[in-house]
Amino acid sequence: MKGCKDMFNVLINLKIQVSAKLKWIEENDPPYEETEWHKIFELPFKITRDSKRQWLQFQTLHTILPTNYYLYKLKLIESLNCSFCRKHPETIDHLFVECYEVKKTTDGCRRSIFKTIQDSHNIFDRYNILFEKYEDCKKNRVQNLLIFLTKHYIFTCRFKTVPTIIFMDLIEKIKSRFLIEKYLLLRNCKFDEYENHWQHVIDSL
């Protein structure tokens, strides 16, 4: 009689079209099939219990992330320009993908400690940043965690008195989180997962 699990299951079974998905398709034409979209929207809640990670990706996918562009449309702020470059409207695409200051950070991150990841040049491509890697969740957990940590750091930097992305600060946050992942994997005796997916990255930190 308590909780909302039953109602949640009813809504899931209705298979209602998510309006945000239609908006992404209309504006950006991502090359995803219907089954892929389902996995993309399900991914944040399938691969982690971290509410910050779930909420950030939920807001991104549903295009309700409070960027300057979104807040300006709601008439809550006076400027829609990017917090970092201050030249272009701060849309979700611009904030995480197009901004020059952000590109410098993601390129530096990829070159410095994640060059050992296979196809590392594709880690921060537009589709991975916005939608994350939905296929083979266990294999791509390292990449998805890296993408999230980078996105979360970029987003929180907007709230500084002087919005600035400090590359070494991001690297330290990534190192700290990845060492925690190492500890959890080894404590739970998941040696194969650690050796196959995490070790070559953590050793390079």
Image: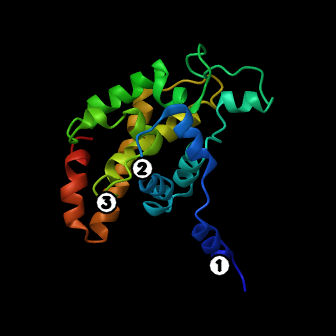
In the image, residue 195 lies at what x, y percent?
Answer: 18, 58
The residue pinned by badge 3 equals 138
Residue at 36% x, 34% y is 124
Circle 2 sits on which residue? 33
Give how far across and how far down residue 65 sits, in percent.
Answer: 63, 40
Q: Disc 1 designates what residue?
A: 6
- 94 or 112: nearer the viewer: 94
Image mark count: 3
Q: Is residue 65 above or below residue 196?
A: above
Residue ID at (49%, 21%): 99
> Residue 169: image x %, image y %?
44, 33
Q: Secondary structure at mark 2?
A: loop
Q: Residues within 10 Å of mark 1 (few under 14, many from 20)?
A: few
| Residue at the far top in the pictured view | 87
Q: Amino acid at mark 2?
A: Glu
User: Badge 2: how crowded within 10 Å, few (<14), some, or many (20+)?
Assistant: few
First reached walking from the N terminus: tag 1 or tag 2: 1
Do labels 2 and 3 touch, CB within 8 Å?
Answer: no
Mark 2 vs 3, N-terminal side: 2
Residue displayed at 23% across by 54% down: 197
Looking at the image, is mark 3 or mark 1 nearer the viewer?
1
